[in-house]
Image: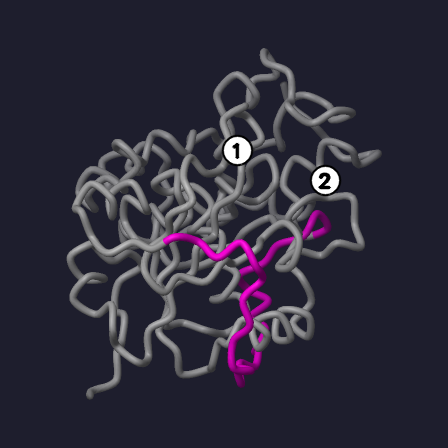
Amino acid sequence: MSTLQITQPIVSVHWLSEHLNHPDLVILDATIKKITSQDGSKDSNLKIKGARFFDIKNVFSDTTTNIPNMLPSPENFTKACKTLGINSHHTIVVYDTLGIYSSPRVRWMFKAMGHQNIAVLNGGFPAWQKAEQLCEIEDTNQQEYNHGNFEANYTPKLVTNAKKVLVEMNTESVLILDARSPGRFAASEPEPRKNLKRGHIPNSMNLHYTEVLNNGKMKSSIELQEILKDFNIKDKKLIFTCGSGITACIIMLATELAGYHNVSIYDGSWSEWGQLDGVPIQC
């Protein structure tokens, strides 16, 4: 059987169904609960056949900091991937049960760790179920996999920290896009996390992540290009931020689908910026 390669940032339900039994394929369920919603993260105990749970919150985050969802060290990411049975040659498709929500975060994490052969399932689990594709009941016991040989190769250009933001927010060749709601961006709504100031990073612009989605799926590349043309982003480096680095990855994925590739995620996002002393904030 030929090697399975992914050439686009997203794949369709049809594509995944056609390749479901390919030996190179690993499917990851990256579902987490929305911080801005009271809804549960899952409404059933079903998953895509053969999917492995990618635990963003408890395993694939830096748990030594009070800032949520921070990227773990390459060493810890490598260790966790090996435990999950992931090999360096694997083709990875990641999904979540909310359509497209946390899955783009996982794609960015793998790319930041040097693994390029990964894509998001467009429409996620709802689209998979709607198409009546193969599902199975989740095993409530922690599954064990054959130890993988994954090795992280950290790519720092895809990751931005607060120190870099302080410099680059005043650089004309850089644009910061904030995926939070317009109310949070403008400081007219409270932050869902306690003890965070309101407002946004100076010179950043607001692109709510819902604007690039249509019923849990990514809008077409033409639609995304139309949305982004008003932001004057041609030839600029793009830094994406949000509340805790999750929805920032949605709009990063959207810009890549629209043809932009000089991109980076501010990993700490507002969960960090909103509690730092001495950094500028606009309202």
Q: Image height check: is 185 above or below 216?
A: above
Residue at the right extreme of this rendering:
277
For the C terminus, which image quadrant?
top right
Q: Identify which residue, 180 or 152, lies in the foreground.
A: 152
Q: Residue furthest bottom?
A: 1
Residues in magenta? 137-163
Instruction: Report the amino acid beneath label 2.
Output: Glu
Q: Quadrant of the N terminus?
A: bottom left
* Residue 34 circle label: 1
Q: Residue 155's image quarter?
A: bottom right
Q: Which mark is residue 179?
A: none
Callout count: 2
Identify the residue at image location x=35%, y=74%.
Answer: 91
Q: Amino acid at mark 1?
A: Lys
Earlier in the chain: of badge 2 and badge 1, it is 1
Q: Is residue 94 above or below residue 181?
A: below
The answer to whether residue 200 is left or right of residue 225 is: right
The residue under label 2 is: 272
Residue 78 position in % (x across, y down): 61, 75
Q: Is residue 174 left or right of residue 69?
A: left
Q: Which residue is painted at 50% across and 74% down in the image?
A: 114
